[in-house]
Every structure is written in structure tokens, then in C-alpha cells.
Image: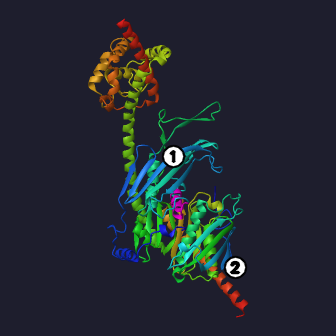
Amino acid sequence: MEYVSPEGLRLDGRRPMEMRQIRAEIGAVSKADGSAIFEMGNTKVIAAVYGPREVQNRSQQISSHALVRCEYSMANFSAGDRMRKPKGDRRSTEISLVIRQTMEACILTHLLPRSQIDIYVQVLQADGGTRSACINAATLALADAGIPMRDLVTSCSAGYLNSTPLLDLNYGEDSAGGPDVTLGILPKLDKVTLLQMDSKLPIDLLENVMQLAIEGCKAIANYIREILLENTNQLEYRRGV
Amino acid sequence: MEQRLANSWRMPINDIKFIETALLSDLRVDGRRPFDHRKLTIKLAKEDGSAEVHLGHTHVMAFVTAQLLRPYRDRPNEGSLSIFTEFSPMADPSFEPARPADAAVELGRVIDRGLRESRAIDTESLCVLSGKLVWSIRVDIHILDNAGNLVDAANIAALASLLTFRRPECSLSGDDGQEVVVHPPEHRDPIPLIIHHLPIAVTFGFFSNENLLVIDPTHQEERVMTGRMTATVNSNGDVCAIQKAGGEGVSQSVIMHCLKLAHTKATDITTKIRDAVEIHNNERALRKIKRHSSSVAVDVCGAVIGLGEQNQLDGSHLENLKLKEEENFMECEATPSGQVQSKDQVSKDFVGGPSSWDPYSECVNSDLLKASLASRGPSVPSKQKDSRRETKPKEPPQEIKTDSSPIDNALTAGQNNEGKTLKDAVKPKHKRKKKVSSNSEN
């Protein structure tokens, strides 16, 4: 099957280096301390952050750091067929672990000892790149909750089909069986925190694909910064500053 | 994550500082250099599809089984491969017996991704009936001792067990070719899986200091390190999977450096695995020869004991044997007649010898060859009678002796019809002998 046409257009009409349309909204869940909705094309994800609050399970309390917990689940209606087990299956457990460790690396946990930060991420619409959308949404939610962080964490996926590196794969391109690289970076520090890759790819081609994903992450980081600034302006306005 | 406090082992700050300081001078606590692997030992059990790996003190065991199942709806032509992990609390008190911990799920998925997505195992060859029956391969990995770096050890164990696994051969039969007959290993040799390449996992540990990087972290180093990355690379230089699930941020150049290191390590480990598998395959071939001798001895004993049952069949069998022997006189390949002929020689001269015997192979006994050639002189039926008479007094010692020289003869294949022809050959002979002897006694 042809994923990149001879004119250089992908299945949804994008260019190989083009990302899907991003849209973000802060403050979707009013009860949570911080929340955000993040959309990447048709993938829509909602994240809610509760914390810092008292550790619910005393035995897990860490005296020097905050405890970060994360739960990833996909809504039953998020994918094409109704999902039988949205959470607790192995993929969800792994992605929860991945998101938790990624955010834990950038949260300044030593400033909040003996406390707990909960991140809940729910996928409302899944069209490829859910992991990346979840991390972006979690970053926004954490910023909205006012939790101190080293840097934003932004994430983007990239692949390699028909001998072309492609940025931001959708579900059709993802399930094509080609390599799929999900990358998460700290943009200002220029450090890679998350890197997951599957399927076979020679090392030199992988370098190109990774570089493309890093560019995508930096573009998302710019957008997130704009959104956060916009949000802060709104808060100032509402407080009458 | 939901571990009980009592079960998690806290590392003292002194140890943490010591490990970090030693690493600054490129020294590791167990005396290795930063990019050295621990000693790797791969033990392959006698049965197919089982491997035991020791990576330093880390001890992991893998076992492969196969089952015929319905395929997935979206992949009707492909078999399936699934990895299951058992994190026994025996290995580490922090492993809980009931629910698999996050680390267990992650390990299973990393190995699964490395094998499945990179198409290391050819799943299309596992299809028997498209859309109805396919072979489902299941790899069970048991962690027996956690001394750090479980992913690498488990990956090697899974690969070694998959390389030595043999699945039963099956064929289609029935009116419309829809019935599947699974042949047990005694009838047809089981066949190995088709494995295109070996994805080897190499785990790196990152520390809070930028320049520190270790390969194959031990349990203590895992506690100290702030980030980890597992790169699954094959010896061709393809990256099959990368898992860096958060943790310390590293620059892209460090990651590329790690991938290149992983490539060199992967080639080393691939050669080690292939060597171990080759030794196992050689032993397996040797064992096949020995297996025949022991099974022949059992049949002989059985035939002596249970004699009266097959009297009606013996006459017709004997006729068939006579005809076959007349047709294929000097044929020494692995045909039933050849086997029957050779069995005569074998039973005449030896005890519990191999059923199919190729006198033109290397390790043949020259005396035996002379004896067989000499005995082929006279006509076939009388020779048969003579041999039978002669074998009768030798029956009791036959049961006792099993390890005589014919075991050393190299065999050609032929175990397919071994059981059938041996029984046919031995039982009628016994019967005839007894009749003759009773006549002679009378």
C-alpha cells in the first residue's frame, strides 16, 4: 500500500514533514487542580492532575520526594471497535509507567516531600500518537496545577514508510507495520527523556527519523508555551490585573 | 509501584555515593569496566524449547510451547507469538506474587516488541489452515534470581529457547483437506521455527552526572541510576526496538553512541547464543541415535513377554517380509526391507542394536560387515530360519545387554517405520523359533 504518493502527499493529504493540527485547552476538569485537553489531528486526550496532596497510602510515602502516580486509560468509544478492557491490560499498564517516569523526571519532586501527585490521562479519540498526546496534555495539566517543573515535556511520533521519514503518524500509518518512533524531549534543555521505537530500522535511518521527531517536539513546545501565556493573560484579566 | 514498604529494599546513602564516585573513575563495584557485560552462561536443556541463562548472578529461565488455535481476526494467515513473564517473589522480595508489577509488564512488552514487530519469528509459516487453525507460540519466562538487568537476560533466554524449539509437524487430510493431523514426535521429526534474525537487548544506565554511562547494570547500580535505556539491536545493525521510558534526560548524541555500542555487544552475544544452540543441536542428533538403541531393547523385551497375542498376524507378516527381502537384497538404505534385513543381522549378532543400520557409514564394524555378507549367501527363507533359531538362545542375554558396539554406528534416518518393522520382524521370528524348538524337542 502506498503511504506516500508520488507527488509527496500522505494518506490524509499532509506532506511528510508536516504535523497534524494541534489544539489545546486548559481547565477542562473544574474539580482537578490542573487539567487540559490536547488534540493532535483526530486524537483527543484529556488529562487531570490532582496534587500536591497528602499521600493516601502511608506505606508508600517517601520522606524526601513527592510520589508521582499516573493512570492511562482509553475510553471504550475511543477506537473504532468498542473496547472491552480500557485499563488494566498490559498496554495501558506500560503506557502508565512510561508517562509516570517521563513526568517524574521533569517534576521537581524534592520540593514537595511526603506528598502525592496524581496524573490521570484518558483518551477520548484515538487516531495514532496517543502516547504523545497524553504526555503533552499531562505537561499542560501539571503547569495548570502550578507544580514546579524543570522544563516542559513535549512528545511527538515519527515513522519511516515508503523510504520517507514521516512526522506525526496517524492510525493508518502506525498500523502499517513500519517503524514507529515516539520521542519526548525537554525542549529548553535539549534532552531526550522518552524514546520508544518498534519494528526494524537501520541505525543511520533511525538518526534521521529521531531528528525529525525532535523538530516536531520543538514545534509543539512553542505552541504549548503560547497556550500557557494566553492562559496566564486570561487569569490576570479575570483577577482584574 | 504499589509495593509494600516492608518488601522494598532501601539502599543506604553511603552505598549510593560510593557507586557514583567510583563510576567517576570508570570503576564499577564488581570490578567491571563501564561497557563490560557480566559473564553470560546459556544452558540448553535436553528437551527442545527450554533455556536457562545466567548473566552474572541474574538467573532467568524460558520455555516455549505451541498450541493450535484460531488466529486473530485481522491476521488470518499468521500464527501468533506471546510472551508471558513470571516474576517470582523468590527472585526479589519486592515482586508480588499476585498482580504483575509494572516492571514485569514492561519487560514482557519490551521482549515482545523486539521479537514480534521486527519480524524476527516468521509467523506466516505457522499458519496451518488460513482463518481456522494456526500455531500459537507461547514463551514463558521465569525470573529465578534478580541481580539486575532482567531484560537482557530474559531476552537471551527467550531467543535461545525459541532457537531450540521444535514444533510437531502436521499435515492436512480428510476429504476436503480440512482435517489437520498432528504427528507426534515419534512418527515425524518436529520442525524448528523460522527465525530471520536475533534481536539482542542491551540495557544502559544513566546517572545524574552527564558523562556516566554503564552497560548491564547490577541490582545496586539499578537503584542508583536515574535513567535507563534498553536498545534491542540485531547483528546486522538494525535497531529492532528502543525503550527509554522517561528518567534522566540525555542528549541525542549520547543516544546514538549507545546504539552503536549496543550493535557491537549484540554481535558478541549473537555468536554466544548461536554456539550454544549448535552444541545443543549436535547433542540432539547424537541422542537420536542412542534413543533408537534403547527403544529397540525395550521392544525386544516386550516381544518376548507378550508373545501369544499376535499369532494370527505373524504368518502374513512373514510372507510380506520374505517377499520384501527377496526384492531388495543388497539394498542398504533406510527402507523397511533394508531394515528388516539389517535387523536380522543385528538380532543375530548383537543385542539391542539400532533398527536402521547403514553398513556403508563410517563407524561400521568390519567383522559385522563380513558376517552379514557371509550370511547373505544362502537363500533368504532358510537364512531367516537359521537366524531365528540362533537368536532364540540369545534372547535372555539380549534383554540385559544394551550398550554394545552397534550403538556406535552412525544411522541414517528411518526411525519413521522403526517401531512397525521391528515388531513385525521380531515377533514372528520368535513364534517360528518356538514352534521349531518345540518340534525339535518332541
Indicate the quadrant containing the N terminus of chain B: top left, top right, bottom left or bottom right: bottom right
A35 on left or right of B419? right
Q: Is B241 rendered above or below residue B47?
A: below
Q: CA distance from mark 1 to mark 2?
A: 51 Å
Which residue ends up furthest to the left in the rendered image?
B367
The answer to whether any part of residue A185 appears in the image is no
The image position of residue B11, as x and y in percent, is: 42, 72
Indicate the quadrant containing the C terminus of chain B: top left, top right, bottom left or bottom right: top left
Residue at image coords 62%, 73% = A119
Q: Residues within 10 Å of mark 2 (few under 14, many from 20)?
A: some
Q: Is A38 rendered above or below residue B409?
A: below
Which residue is label 2 attached to? A27
Q: Main structural element of the magenta stretch: helix, strand or loop?
A: helix
The answer to whether any part of residue B128 appears in the image is yes
Q: Amino acid at mark 1?
A: Thr
Count how many numbered circles sit on residues in the image: 2
The image position of residue A115, as x and y in percent, is: 56, 79
Residue numbers of the magenta segment: B99-112
The image position of residue A110, as x and y in percent, is: 51, 81
* Residue A221 occupies quadrant: bottom right
Which residue is label 1 attached to? B65
Residue at image coords 70%, 62% = A76
Q: Nearer the viewer, residue B437 or B408?
A: B437
